[in-house]
């Protein structure tokens, strides 16, 4: 099993052993230090632009009004939503991208060896998270709201996947009018984005992951099952901010994580449960999506969600890291 830095950080420390995923049942996640990179794996700097790349994955809600230059991402509390599987909110980054003179190293339980590098991790449950230069000043966030490939069931390019149309819209899925009056009671933490670039991301590798291989059909069970939409959906979104000649800082409560200038700095903010293997044959579902209905008002439907098309990936533990979020 060969992992580059991006793969390792995307899976997360616990994900190397357990893999994040969505599904019924209960399990426990071991502390981060119980996991090390597999024998023979390599973790090396990926090529990429000089920018901070924050990938969000798991149980999240995006608030964004079309045409505006800002967005907010809420990590959701699975327990309060009554989702059976426990979700763990964490942020992880590579030590080599961090300015150690301005950043305190986490405790040993949150440091994972990664070849000649290390993964540093921070717990996010109930903590204030801020990305410096993502707030303040006149908002000018560039958002990939749509793409020319939105009418396609499955995008054919990275640009097609970048459209937020690949994240289910709660207003459409539930025929709702908006969020409840106090949605923050369901939030683990909230992160505002006002500068840089934000959009969806390709949901993994077609050879190993469910996302690129699945097309989901949402139907209104009333009146014989009117189709709401049918398309491939992503489970991850990406926020980027240039590091050209500038250091960037993410704060977790009073802890500052300062990233070096002129580096390619991949960061993962994940809110995922332990793995529930999809099995052979793989029969993925989106059962957990129904729990998002607790966040909206005037919902007229609880959609029927079925797997319209699926080609089982030829490699890997398909489904172990696929769980689309939502937007409104």
Image (cartoon, grey):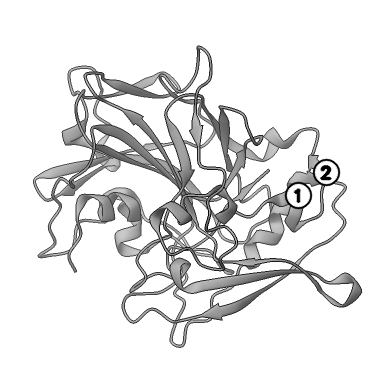
Which of 285 and 141 lies nearest the eye of the viewer? 141
Q: Is residue 77 above or below residue 73?
A: below
Q: Secondary structure at mark 1?
A: helix
Q: Is residue 40 above or below residue 48?
A: below
**Percent of width and height locating residue 302:** 80, 63
Which of 328 and 40 lies nearest the eye of the viewer? 328
**Percent of width and height locating residue 214:** 51, 73
Residue positioned 70% across, 56% down in the render? 291
Q: Quadrant of the C terminus?
A: top right
Q: Are marks 2 and 1 in contact (CB under 8 Å)?
A: yes
Q: Residue furthest bottom?
A: 281
Which of 242 and 42 lies nearest the eye of the viewer? 242
Q: Which residue is mark 2?
A: 177
Question: Tag 1 or tag 2, which sits nearer the N-term?
Answer: 1
- In the rendered image, which quarter is residue 190 located in? top right
Q: Residue furthest top?
A: 137
Q: Which residue is mark 1?
A: 171
């Amino acid at each position: 099993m060969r992992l580059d830095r991006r793969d390792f950080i995307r899976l997360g420390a616990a994900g190397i052993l357990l893999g994040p995923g969505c599904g019924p049942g209960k399990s426990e996640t071991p502390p981060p230090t119980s996991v090390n990179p597999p024998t023979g794996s390599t973790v090396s700097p990926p090529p990429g632009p000089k920018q901070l790349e924050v990938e969000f994955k798991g149980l999240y809600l995006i608030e964004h009004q079309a045409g505006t230059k800002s967005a907010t991402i809420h990590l959701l509390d699975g327990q309060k939503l009554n989702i059976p599987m426990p979700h763990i909110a964490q942020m992880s980054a590579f030590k080599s991208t961090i300015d150690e003179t301005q950043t305190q190293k986490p405790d040993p339980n949150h440091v994972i060896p990664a070849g000649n590098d290390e993964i540093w991790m921070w717990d996010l449950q109930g903590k204030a998270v801020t990305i410096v230069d993502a707030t303040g000043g006149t908002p000018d966030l560039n958002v990939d709201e749509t793409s020319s490939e939105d009418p396609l069931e499955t995008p054919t390019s990275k640009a097609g996947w970048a459209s937020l149309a690949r994240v289910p819209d709660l207003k459409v899925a539930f025929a709702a009018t908006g969020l409840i009056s106090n949605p923050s009671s369901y939030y683990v933490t909230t992160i505002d984005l006002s500068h840089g670039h934000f959009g969806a991301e390709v949901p993994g590798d077609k050879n190993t992951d469910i996302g690129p291989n699945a097309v989901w059909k949402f139907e209104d069970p009333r009146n014989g099952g009117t189709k709401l939409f049918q398309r491939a959906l992503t489970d991850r979104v990406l926020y980027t901010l240039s590091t050209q000649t500038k250091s960037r800082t993410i704060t977790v409560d009073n802890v500052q994580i300062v990233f070096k200038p002129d580096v390619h700095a991949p960061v993962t903010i994940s809110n995922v449960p332990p793995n529930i293997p999809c099995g052979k044959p793989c029969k993925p579902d989106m059962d957990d999506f129904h729990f998002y209905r607790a966040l909206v008002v005037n919902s007229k439907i609880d959609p029927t969600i079925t797997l319209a098309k699926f080609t089982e990936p030829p490699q890997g533990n398909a489904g172990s890291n696929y769980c689309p979020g939502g937007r409104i």
